[in-house]
Image (spheres, grey):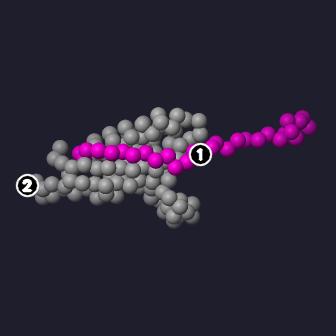
Amino acid sequence: MESMGTDNSLGSIRIADEVVEVIAGLAASEVEGVVGMSGGLVGDLANMLGRNKNLSKGVKVEVGEHEVAVDLFIVVEYGVSIPDVAFSVQQAVKEAIESMTGLKVVEANVHVQGVNFKPVVETKEEDLRLK
């Protein structure tokens, strides 16, 4: 595939940074053990208020002519192996970007911003008694 950001006989091909961010965000969120992406305080508040459906949340990219560097900010599930999840995120993001855009991923930096605990269901003593 012709590398992005170059001209050919039909014209030029350019891929917006936002497109690469969305590809990376979707690939990362599909990895088992990733609960969500962390977009920082402002992004998280906008998401909670329902004003923002940002698919590139928690992703920053630097796109060059032929290469891309990605920073991912993730939240993982409690109990998973964080290094294993982070490596899986790196692999998934690299494969997705390279196969869809033709750009070479030179860096895929994973920043674990938090751990999500599953809510514990508490049973009260009263619930256990027969009536």
The residue tagged 2 is 9
**Residue contact at pointers 2 and 1, CB within 8 angstroms:** no
Near-viewer residue (43 or 55):
43
Q: Residue at x 42, y 49 (%)?
A: 72
Q: Amino acid at mark 1?
A: Asn
Q: Quadrant of the N terminus?
A: top left
Residue 76 horizontal side relative to residue 55, left or right: right
Q: Amino acid at mark 2?
A: Ser
The residue tagged 1 is 116
**Horizontal and vertical percent position of residue 2:** 16, 47
Q: Is residue 50 visible?
A: no
Label 2 secondary element: loop
**Horizontal and vertical percent position of residue 87:** 42, 37
Label 1 secondary element: strand
**Horizontal and vertical percent position of residue 66:** 21, 49
Q: Is residue 114 a member of the stretch shown in magenta?
A: yes
Q: Nearer the viewer, mark 2 or mark 1?
A: 1
Near-viewer residue (14 or 81):
81
First in sequence, mark 2 or 1: give its number: 2
> What range is drawn magenta here?
102-131
Q: Residues within 10 Å of mark 2 (few under 14, many from 20)?
A: few
Q: Is residue 123 visible?
A: yes
Residue 58: image tag: none
Q: Residue at x 48, y 50 (%)?
A: 37
Q: Residue at x 8, y 54 (%)?
A: 9
**Horizontal and vertical percent position of residue 124:** 83, 41
